[in-house]
Amino acid sequence: MNRVRSRKGAPGIVEVALRAGVSPATVSRFYNSPDKVRSGTRQRIEQAAKDMGYIRDRMAGSMHSRYSGTIGLIVPTLNNAIFAELADTFSRQLSTHERTMLIACNNYDLDAEVDIVRSLLERRIDGIALIGHDHTDTALHMLSVRDIPVLSLWNYREDALLPSIGASNEQAAELATQHLLNLGHEKIAFMFSDTAINDRSRDRKMGALTTMKDHGIAVSDDMILDCPYNTGIAKTITTNLLQQKRPTAVLCGNDVIAHGVLYAALALGIKVPEQLSVTGIGDFANSADMVPSLTTVRLPAKRIGQLAADNIVAMSMARNQLPKTHSKLDCNLIVRESTCAVSAN
C-alpha cells in the first residue's frame, strides 16, 4: 500500500523505514514496543529518524491506545520559585519516560482548578499531579469517573484520600518554632496565608501553635496574622505590627512572607537578628542570598518532582491499579543569619 508523507512533505514512517532498511511495520513496532526490536535495528531506526527530522505523531497512535503521552500538573503559582523548581524537575523527569508535561496555575483558586481539570481532560492526559489535598469534589469526581491517575504533591498525610508524595508541613513549622524556642524566644508573631483552602498553610499553622502550646506558651490572637504569599503585602502588615507590638521573633508561613518581614524591619531601622529574629518555610532560591540570609525550613522540591514523575507514569501504565501509597520526605531546618538568641535582642 502506498503511503504519503505525514504532513506537507514531512517524513513519515515509510521514509524512515526506507532509510533504515527495514519495513514500515518494524518502524511502527519500534515506537510502540521498542523491546521487541533488536538493538542494532533500533539504532538504525533512531539514526534514520534523527537524520530525516522525523517527528512521531503520538496523537495518531493514541487513537488506538490508552496513552497520549501527556501528564498534567496544576500548581498554585509559578511566581514562587519553589513551585517553578518543582515543575522544572517534574518535566525533566517525565522526559526520561518519553512523556510531556502540561502545566497550569490555579492561583490558589479551587473553583478555577475545576475548569483547568476539565481542559486537561479534553486533551486526554494520562495522569495528573495536584498540589496538596484541598480540592473540590467536582474536580476529583471528573477525574475519578474517567479513571485518571491522580497524585497529590507537597503535603504528606498518612490518611490522605489521594496517593501523595511530600513532606509534613506540620513538622516543618514545628522545626521552625522549636528553633526559635531553643533560642529563648517566647513573644513570637506568626504570619500565615489563608488556611481555609490551603492545607499546607493550615498544617503549618497547626504545627507552630501546637508546639507553642506544648511548651506552655499562650499566643494571643493579635500575634497571629493572616498574610497572603505576597512580599509587598507582608511588608505592610509587618510594618503595622512592629509599630504597635514588639515581638522578639516572627515565624512566617513561607519565605515570600519572610522576605516582606525583612524588608519591613530594614525600613523601620530594626536590626535583624539582634532586635528581631525571622524564620521562613520553603528555602526559596534567593533566601540564602539575602542580607541577612534567611533561616528557614527546606522542603525537598526537586525530590518531590522527580518521584512524582516516576510514580504518575507508573500509575498510568498500570491503568491506575497500583495500591495507594504515601511517600514522606524529610524537611530540614537551615539556620542562617536571620535568627539569634533572645538574650542578644
Image: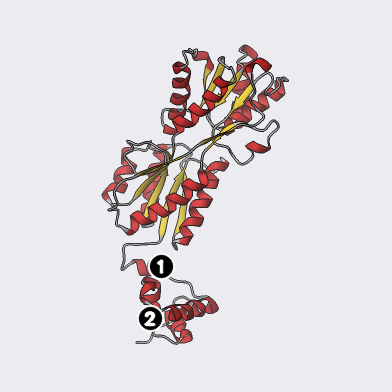
- Residue 69: quarter of image: bottom left
Local packing at callout 1 (Cα closer than 10 Å; few below 14, some 14-19, many 20+) is some
Question: Can you tell which mark lies on residue 26?
Answer: 2
Q: Nearer the viewer, residue 39 or 49?
A: 39
Task: Please name the amino acid that badge 1 sits on.
Answer: Arg
Q: Is residue 113 visible?
A: yes
Picture layout, residue 72 above or below residue 337: below
Query: Circle 2 sits in a helix, a strand or a loop, which is it?
Result: helix
Q: Where in the figure is residue 93, as x and y percent of width and height?
A: 48, 56
Residue shown at the point (38%, 52%) measured from the top left: 312
Task: Please name the amino acid that badge 2 sits on.
Answer: Thr
- Residue 336: quarter of image: top right
Query: Circle 1 sits in a helix, a strand or a loop, which is it?
Result: helix
- Is the C terminus in the top left, top right, bottom left or bottom right quadrant? top right
- 298 sits to left or right of 316: right
- Is the N terminus in the top left, top right, bottom left or bottom right quadrant? bottom left
Question: Can you tell which mark lies on residue 334?
Answer: none
Spatial CA span between label 2 and label 1: 17 Å
Mark in the foreground, 2 or 1:
2
Local packing at callout 2 (Cα closer than 10 Å; few below 14, some 14-19, many 20+) is many
Residue shown at the point (41%, 67%) measured from the top left: 58
Residue that protrudes farthest toward the front in the picture: 182
Q: Where in the figure is residue 118, as x and y percent of width and height?
A: 36, 49
Q: Where in the figure is residue 251, as x and y percent of width and height?
A: 56, 24
Picture layout, residue 229 above or below residue 217: below
Q: Nearer the viewer, residue 336 or 161?
A: 336
Q: Where in the figure is residue 235, as x and y percent of width and height?
A: 63, 26
- 90 sits to left or right of 143: right
Q: How many marks?
A: 2
Q: Is residue 227 visible?
A: no
Question: Can you tell which mark lies on residue 58?
Answer: 1
